[in-house]
Amino acid sequence: MNDSAKNINQNSSPDNEASGILPCQALLQMFEHTGELRAEQPLAEDQIQPASIDLRLGAKAYRVRASFLPGERSSVTDKLKHFAMHEMDISEGAVLEKGCVYIVPLMESLALPSGVSAAGNPKSSTGRVDVFTRLITDHGSEFDRVREGYHGPLYAEIAPRTFSILVRKGSRLSQLRIRRGGEVQPEITRLADGEMGNGRVIPISVDVQGDADAGLIGYRAKAHAGLIDIDQKQHCRISDYWEPVYTQGEHGLILDPGEFYILASKEAVSIPPDYAAEMIAYDTLVGEFRVHYAGFFDPGFGHGDGQAARAVLEVRSYEVPFVLEHGQTVGRLNYEKLTAHPDQLYGGGALDSSYHRQGLALSKHFIR
């Protein structure tokens, strides 16, 4: 058993008939017993999260002319024959340049049984450096969605928007959640800070007041910054890549179109141990802006006494300047039940939980 599995009890399997998101112990069984999850190499350390699996880049990347979906009649390989401009060996490292689009075959593949589907999402550290990453499957008609019973390879579409990045075989930019049956719609009655809410979708608002002393409310990315090695922690100086954004008092914050901001939610977020959540990234009902690129929240995030953590928002406005006021609703958290209590929780045990008890926080790549 590899390091990532040491703290996962393989005998605590969920009810095979239960619907919902599969926890870590079920994901491990899919690798080691049923073959429903497969990989070119053994699992890496900390690759299995409480309710998701990190996906690793393979050895090749393809620079493509445009983003695409294969559609029902084509595989990704079929499309690459037409749209690929250049094939790159990234085994020992290669630069993915901002403003370009790449397709990378992943080391993991699926052989899902009937009634089981999956969903992809960028990892938090990926979204916070403005790397637009989406999951693609053969014959797929949607990004980040793996149809029920899918058998086949997985691919990442990678489009760095602000910073060029250095990646290599094994780099982890995205995650996969696996769901048995349809979505389980729980009634969430607990909001952060003791408030109450109804249904499974909870509104999230933005903090543009910040710390009472410093008034820092976020960061805006610099347009011509250097390279970021996606696998290195705390190696970049904040001032080389970001401009601090301070409160503008009662007037809120004006988002400049196309600029990339890191902000934080007003509320603390709590994900109970038997739940997972996903932030809805783009909702025209609250404005023409995107509020999140990496939307998975794991079981145990911000849960328990003294564990409060705010949601970090990756924000870009489209088309027109837009005013964000303090406490304005900017997104929604969609909660879903797990099939069983996970053997690991976010921030617990041997897991490398970079954003445990976070407030306003840049990605793990920056010196704190």
Image (cartoon, helix red, strand yellow):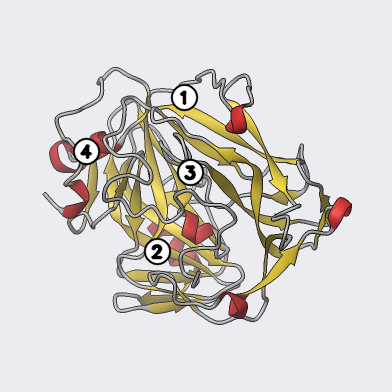
Looking at the rendering, which quadrant does residue 52 occupy?
top left
State the SS at label 1.
Answer: loop
The residue singled out by tag 2 in the image is: 104
Q: Earlier in the sequence, mark 3 or mark 1?
A: 1
For the question of whether residue 183 can be seen, the reply is: yes
Name the mark nearer the viewer: 2 or 3.
Answer: 3
Q: Estimate the x, y position of residue 327 in percent, counting from the top left.
A: 75, 41
Q: Residues within 10 Å of mark 4 (few under 14, many from 20)?
A: some
> Residue at 29% across / 44% down in the picture?
110
Read off the residue under disc 3. 296
Label 4, secondary structure: give it.
Answer: helix
Q: Residue at x 60, y 50 (%)?
A: 292
Q: CA distance from mark 1 to mark 2?
A: 29 Å
Q: CA distance from mark 1 to mark 4?
A: 20 Å
Q: Which mark is residue 183?
A: 1
Q: Residue 331 is drawn in which quadrant?
A: top right
Question: Which amino acid, mark 4?
Answer: Met
Q: Is residue 138 left or right of residue 204?
A: left
Query: Mark 2 vs mark 4: which is more N-terminal?
Result: 4
Label 3 close to label 1 by CB (< 8 Å)? no
Residue 201, position as x, y percentages in the image: 60, 28
Q: Nearer the viewer, residue 132 or 66?
A: 132
Give me the disc on residue 30.
4
Q: Is residue 169 above or below residue 353?
A: below
Inter-mark Cα distance, 4 to 3: 21 Å
Gap in Å between the C-alphas at discs 2 and 4? 23 Å
Q: CA distance from mark 2 to mark 3?
A: 21 Å
> Three-letter amino acid code at disc 1?
Glu
Q: Please tell me whether mark 3 sits on a helix, a strand or a loop.
A: strand
Disc 1 to disc 2: CB gap under 8 Å:
no
Q: Using the rendered image of the protein, determine whether residue 138 is visible from the camera's viewpoint.
A: no
